[in-house]
Amino acid sequence: MTATTITYYLSEHPAVVGFRWSNAQSWGSTWFFLFASIALYLALASILHLLLSLLPSRSRGIPLGPIPAVHSLLMSLTSAVIFAGILLSSAAEIRETRWFWRRSKTPFQWLLCFPLGTRPSGRVFFWSYIFYLSRFIHMFRTFFAILRSRKLTFFHLFNNSILTFMSFMWLEFSQSFQVLAILFTTLVYSVAYGYRFWTAIGLPRACFPFVLNCQVVLLGCNLVCHVGVLLLHFLKGGCNGIGAWLCNSVLNGVILLLFLKFYVKMHLANRKGRRRITTVAGEAEVEETTRCKNK
C-alpha cells in the first residue's frame, strides 16, 4: 500500500471528508446514549466486582488467557490509525481553510483554537468521532482488571467515564484543543498499549515505570495546551466551544489531582519494595515489578 493510498483512505475518502456529527447520521451521538452507556458501564463493573467479592477470599482471579494481550494490540493499532488519520486530516484542513483565518492565526494556533462558528463536520471531526467510539473499547480493561485481580478503584471508573464524556463534548460543541488532545493521547496510547502487548506475550519489561511515565507526559502536554487555549481565547478574539473547554479543564484538573494522589502513594509503595503502576488514561491499577538484568 503506497503513501498516496494511505493518505486517500485516511483523509480524502468521501466518508471522511463528508462526515457530519448529527443525531441522524452518527451512532451514539445523543445525550441519552452517552449517559445510558456510562451508567451501564458503572453498573456492570460494580456488579461484577460485588459478585467476585462474594467468593472465598482465597480464590484467585479468573485467568483470561491471551484476551488482554489481544485487546492491548487492538488498542495500540487503533490508536496509531487515529493518530495518523487526524494528523493527515489536520494538514488537509489547514491547507484548504487557511485562507479564511490566516490573518489572525498560525496553523499551530488553529490546532489549539478553532475559529468561532466552527461546525462539527469534515475530516478532523470524523477522527474525533472514531476516537470517541474507541473510548468504549477502552472500558473493557476495567472488566479484565476486576476478573484478574478482583479489585476496583474509584479513579478507574471516574477516569474512564469522564474521558468518554469529554470526547463527546468535543464533538457536540466543536470544542477547541481537541485536535492536539487526540494527537497526544493516541500517540501515548499506541506506545503504552504496544508496551502492554509486549509484556503480555512474555517479553522483557522496562527497568522503570514505563506506563506511568507515559501518563505523566500526557498530562503535562494537556496542561500546557490548556494554558495555550486560554491565552489565545483572550488574545485572538475567542475560541470556539470555550464553554465546553472550561468544563473540560475542570474535569482534567480533577483527574490531575487524583493522579498526583496516586503518584504520592506509588512513591510510598516504592519505599516498601513494591511499585504500583497505573495504565494510561486511568485504566486498571495492577501490581507490577520491574526487573533489570544485571550486567
Image (cartoon, rainbow, N blue to C red):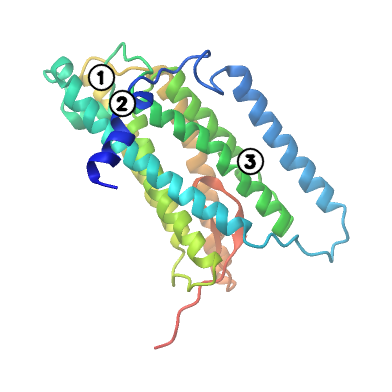
Q: Is mark 2 on a helix, strand or loop?
A: helix
Badge 2 density bin: few <14, some 14–19, many ≥20, Cα 10 Å: some
Instruction: Report, in whole angstroms, how far the alpha carbon at label 2 lies from the one at label 1.
Output: 7 Å
Res 222 label: none
Which residue is at the far left? 103
Residue 92 makes an appearance in the image: yes
Give the amino acid type for the residue marked by disc 2 in the picture.
Answer: Leu
Q: What element carries label 1?
A: helix
Q: Mark 3 points at which residue?
A: 157
Q: Position of residue 172 (x, y in %)?
A: 46, 18
Residue depicted at 42% across the width and 57% down the height: 213
Which residue is at the far bottom? 295
Residue 122 in the image: above or below residue 207 = above
* Mark nearer the N terminus (2 vs 3): 3
Q: Name the residue under label 1.
A: 234
Q: Do the residues labelled 2 and 1 touch (CB within 8 Å)?
A: yes
Q: In this view, does 21 lie to the left or right of 39?
A: left
Q: Quick one: 277 or 188, which is closer to the camera?
A: 188
Badge 3 density bin: few <14, some 14–19, many ≥20, Cα 10 Å: many
Residue 111 in the image: above or below residue 49 = above
Q: Name the residue under label 2.
A: 230
Residue depicted at 37% across the width and 30% down the height: 178
